[in-house]
């Protein structure tokens, strides 16, 4: 496993439409492992493959405090949504910023798991927001397009570590 470089806002790769995964390969398994490691290392709750420069429809999400399995979603699609929530959103591809975004309060997503078996994920509140946010990345969209008002600075630039 390896931590991959997270592409930042302004990188063209974040504006592209990703391709469907047709079959599971060792390369895609490695991508998924690396995406999980990269997400946890950056303290994120979700990561989409284009954020590490790979234009495939793969997303990982972990909104839990601890002890539960992350969601690994291949070729995910929102099939139902309802309600509305407005709250702060941020993105690992735009560090130190956040903004107010309105999303559905509930979504149902169908996808494939790592074994290419169909799965269904229902999410409310933070999980619904994370699902919408990450799936948007697969079509080249970022939350900044949906921000109501201004982008805020969430923290001063972090000093370089290591
Ligand atoms: Ni993001």
Image (spheres, rainbow, N blue to C red):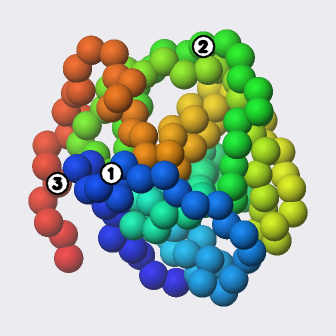
Q: Where does the image place residue 111, in percent across and percent down from the top left?
A: 76, 51
The answer to which of 14 and 1 lies nearer the viewer is 14
Q: Alpha carbon of mark 1 to alpha carbon of mark 2: how far?
A: 25 Å
Q: Is residue 5 left or right of residue 155?
A: right
Query: Circle 1 — which element?
Result: loop
Residue at horizontal 33%, vertical 70%?
5
- At x 19% / y 33%, what residue is drawn? 153
Query: Mark 2 CB in 8 Å range of ligand 1?
Result: no
State which mark lies toward you, 2 or 3.
Answer: 2
Mark 3 neighbour class, 10 Å CA radius: few under 14, some 14 to 19, many 20 or more: few
Quarter of the image with the C terminus is: bottom left
Q: Residue at x 67, y 13 (%)?
A: 83
Image-based side of 82 in relation to 138, left or right: right
Does residue 67 appear in this view?
Answer: no
CB at disc 1 and ligand 1 closer than 8 Å? yes
Pointer 1 with pointer 2, Cβ within 8 A: no
| Residue topped by disc 2 | 84
The residue under label 1 is 93
Label 2 – label 3 distance at C-alpha: 33 Å
């Amino acid at each position: 496993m390896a931590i991959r470089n997270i592409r930042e806002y302004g990188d063209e790769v974040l504006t592209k439409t990703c391709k469907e995964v047709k079959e599971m390969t060792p390369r895609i398994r490695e991508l998924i492992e690396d995406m999980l490691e990269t997400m946890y290392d950056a303290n994120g709750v979700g990561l989409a493959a284009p954020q590490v420069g790979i234009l495939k429809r793969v997303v990982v999400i972990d909104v839990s405090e601890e002890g539960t399995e992350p969601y690994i979603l291949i070729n995910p699609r929102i099939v139902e949504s309802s309600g509305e929530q407005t709250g702060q959103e941020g993105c690992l591809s735009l560090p130190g910023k956040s903004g107010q975004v309105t999303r559905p309060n509930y979504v149902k997503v169908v996808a494939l798991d790592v074994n290419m078996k169909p799965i269904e994920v229902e999410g409310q509140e933070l999980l619904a927001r994370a699902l919408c946010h990450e799936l948007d990345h697969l079509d080249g969209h970022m939350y900044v397009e949906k921000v109501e008002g201004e982008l805020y600075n969430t923290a001063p630039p972090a000093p370089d570590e290591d």
